[in-house]
Amino acid sequence: MTLQLSPVYRGEQIRAAEKPLLDAGKGEQLMRRAAHGLAYRVLQILEQTGGVYGARVTGLIGPGNNGGDGLWALAFLRRRGVDAHAVLLREKAHPAGLEAFRRAGGRTAEDIPAGTSVLIDAILGTGFKGAFTRPEVPGLQQAVSAAVVVACDLPSGVDADTGAAAADVIPADHTVTFGGLKQGLLAGAGGRLSGTVHTVDIGLGPQLPKTPVHAAEPAQPGTGPAPGAEPENPAAPAMLPAVRGPQAADHKYSRGTLGILAGSEQFPGAALLTASAACATGCGMVSLYAPAEVNRLVLQRRPEVVPGTAPATAPEAGKAPAAVVIGPGLGQDPQRMAEAEAALEHALQEAVPCVLDASGLQLVRTQLRRRGGLNKNVLITPHAGEARRLAQDLRDPVLTKQLTPGAGEDPVEAARRLAGALDCSVLLKGTTTIIASPQGEVILHRAQTPGLATAGTGDVLSGILGALAATQPKDWSAVAVHAVDLHRRAAVRIDPHGRGRFGASALIAALGS
């Protein structure tokens, strides 16, 4: 599957892009475009869930421009035959929006009417900062459970810059966001609360800045300009180059050779998962450096794997692995950790692409003392807890705060800061995977695959990463994005409805599908 990279903006960047248009008196034009895009998406949802005419749509309407967007959208929906209601959460509402809503025949309500099919959350927009409390509206809890929730621009209470969110944010099934894809809809808690995100072009393109942050996603229908938007979009998605596949003239060495230092008596399965994933991804030759009993286990299941007992530090010319994976399942075994340290030192000296995962991340502390960091040939793959431990090793309280859930959480900036501090690429695992280069470029990949939150799936990802690194040009960002997407697609093949009822080993067969 070909992936596209769509630009991602912080909320402050979108507001800055809007300002010259607002100053020029085009505020109502922008609002109507946004509202038209929101109404268009709600109509699509209604068509898929039972029909438009007579369907009941209710909006939770805040006092500001976000509420105005919601009111204009309800006015458009009412003209299409929708039974539109607005719950005004303050005495004050956007005047022009409220007038348009009432003129179209919409009705205000004190509670959520029974039978509401779609609930529009239009309480707070990109300017939100601080505390959020879910409004106490009769019927709201029932509507959240029974209706399709559509957030207007972003779920109210989510920080548009960072994705930090209050505890009682209303989770959206869909978010229709305006002007550009906002970082807070993908990162942190926002990535879990925003549902399916739809971006509406309202004509901000010339004002939008260049951004080092992009989202990797398959091209989907219906993500073009909203009806009425100007035909310009200099920030259009770029296509990510496809990974190199096997060629007719290839042999096992030209198809990529991978060395894996993984597994221990305590965690032999990690070696099996990592090596199996590398084989299933299409690596020409996989060598496993592991204790004899671990090698026996792996060879029973994967006889194509070449066994070894310790990584060579001066391999025969032409036979050195093109890439290495260090860390899965090493545990606290002193011998294995000493071997891992030697393998990492060799990879750093010889500029061999190296995936450092799991137990291998403990080696960073030594390299900080020895070299001050790693180098650009290394990709580290921590989850948030491991990243916080690295922040402690770096003695960086700002990084620690950015990685800690709460008001200061900012995982995108954390990944960028960590990559810069260690001079390596970072793949920060989570609901949204964050891939950061030492140069400050970031790619976000939002999986929405709960089945991957189980033991061993990280070992599978390490094997995929190593196999791709052994066959592709030395571009960690492209390798990491494609690896994460292969991982996601394998999970979706097994579990298309996202129930999460499978183990990591099931991913191996799905990788080869």
Image (cartoon, grey):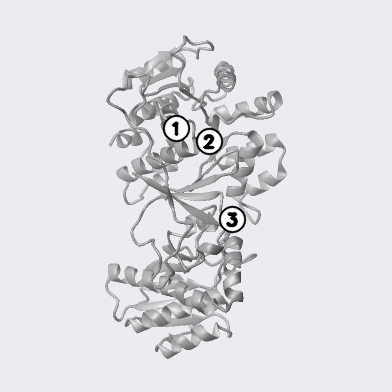
Q: Position of residue 163 (x, y in %)?
A: 56, 56
Displayed quadrant of residue 41: bottom left
Q: For this view, does 455 lie left or right of residue 134?
A: left
Q: What residue appears at the point 53 percent right and 31 percent down from the top-left corner?
A: 358
Name the N-terminal-most of marks 2 and 1.
2
Contact between labelled residues 1 and 2, with CB atoms less than 8 Å apart = yes
Name the N-terminal-most of marks 3 and 1.
3
Displayed quadrant of residue 380: top right
Residue 425: in sight, yes or no?
yes
Q: Secondary structure at mark 1?
A: helix
Q: Amino acid at mark 3?
A: Thr
Relative height, residue 110 to residue 146 (above, below): below
Could you give the CA–CA distance between mark 2 and mark 1, rounded to whole angstroms? 10 Å
Q: Residues within 10 Å of mark 1 (few under 14, many from 20)?
A: many
Q: For this view, does 364 lie left or right of residue 102?
A: right
User: Is 82 or 472 nearer to us in this picture?
Assistant: 472
Could you give the CA–CA distance between mark 2 and mark 3, rounded to whole angstroms? 21 Å
Q: What residue appears at the point 37 percent right and 19 percent down from the top-left corner?
A: 253
Q: Position of residue 171 (x, y in %)?
A: 47, 63
Q: Secondary structure at mark 3?
A: loop
Residue that carries the numbered disc 1 in the rendered image: 465
Name the N-terminal-most of marks 2 and 3.
3
Residue that carries the numbered disc 3 in the rendered image: 162
Quarter of the image for the N terminus: give it: top left
Q: Secondary structure at mark 2?
A: loop
Residue 166: in sight, yes or no?
no
Residue that carries the numbered disc 2 in the rendered image: 381
Q: For this view, does 182 lie left or right of residue 413?
A: left
